[in-house]
Amino acid sequence: MARRSRLRFDPIAEAKKNWDNAGWSDVSDGMAFVTSVMRVHQLLIARVDEVLSPYGLTFARFEVLMLLTFSRTGQMPLGKIGQRLQVHPASVTNAIDRLEGGGLVQRIRHPSDGRTTLATITDAGRDLTLHAVGDLNQEVFAAIGLELSDVRAVVEALSSLRAQAGDFETE
């Protein structure tokens, strides 16, 4: 991936100063947090895309394959895939269309509910997923760029935000 030249200052810290100077210091930390998370999202997506690109996968399609890989039977109703991945049904349909076109999954009718379609991972899908997850584990997940304690603290903090937003039920 081509690297851009580095800035000599942190633009988000500069934006925070501008917020403070504009009289919005009561929300400048929140602005810096949101902007930082969004920028880190861009950086992580770029890293993941770089690793998955040789496999012809996006992260969304990779997530579907992993979900099917981890399921007991290697298959799951399309609606349940959407629920588990927290995406719109149209996004699931698009991902399944692309994966099916590549021979990585196939759609089958649910044996006892004719209204339900199952996505089933193929042997080719399992093989590709095994290779892709190995590369992601090594090149992205094992090298986040933070100490493990920091990674865990960020995950915990973001989990709290997600719970407050209604992503999942808490005890």
Image (tube, rainbow, N blue to C red):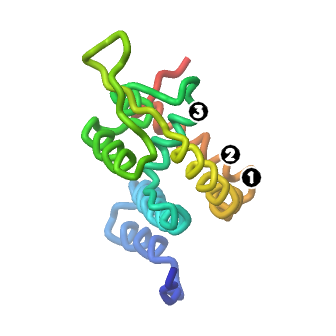
The number of numbered discs placed on residues in the rendered structure image is 3
Image height of 95 relative to 115, above or below: below
Amino acid type assigned to the residue bearing label 1 in the image: Leu
Q: Which residue is mark 2?
A: 152
Q: Is residue 125 left or right of residue 90?
A: right
**Circle nearer the viewer, 3 or 2:** 3
Q: Which residue is mark 1?
A: 148
Q: Nearer the viewer, residue 61 or 15?
A: 61
Amino acid type assigned to the residue bearing label 2 in the image: Arg
Residue 28 shows in the view: no
Label 3, label 2: how far apart the Cα atoms are: 23 Å
Instruction: Single out the residue that lies furthest toward the right.
Output: 148
Image quadrant assignment for residue 83: top left
- The residue lying at 40 percent from left, 52 percent from top is 102
Tell me the quadrant of the picture where the C terminus can be found: top right
Amino acid type assigned to the residue bearing label 3 in the image: Phe
- In the image, residue 161 lies at what x, y percent? 47, 39
Identify the mark nearer the N-term, 3 or 2: 3
Identify the mark nearer the N-term, 3 or 1: 3
Image quadrant assignment for residue 56: bottom left
Image height of 34 relative to 67, above or below: below
Label 1, label 2: how far apart the Cα atoms are: 6 Å
Q: Which residue is mark 3?
A: 70
- In the image, residue 70 lies at what x, y percent? 59, 33
Q: Secondary structure at mark 3?
A: helix
Q: Nearer the viewer, residue 134 or 36?
A: 134
User: Mark 3 and 1 residues: CB-CB less than 8 Å, in contact?
Assistant: no
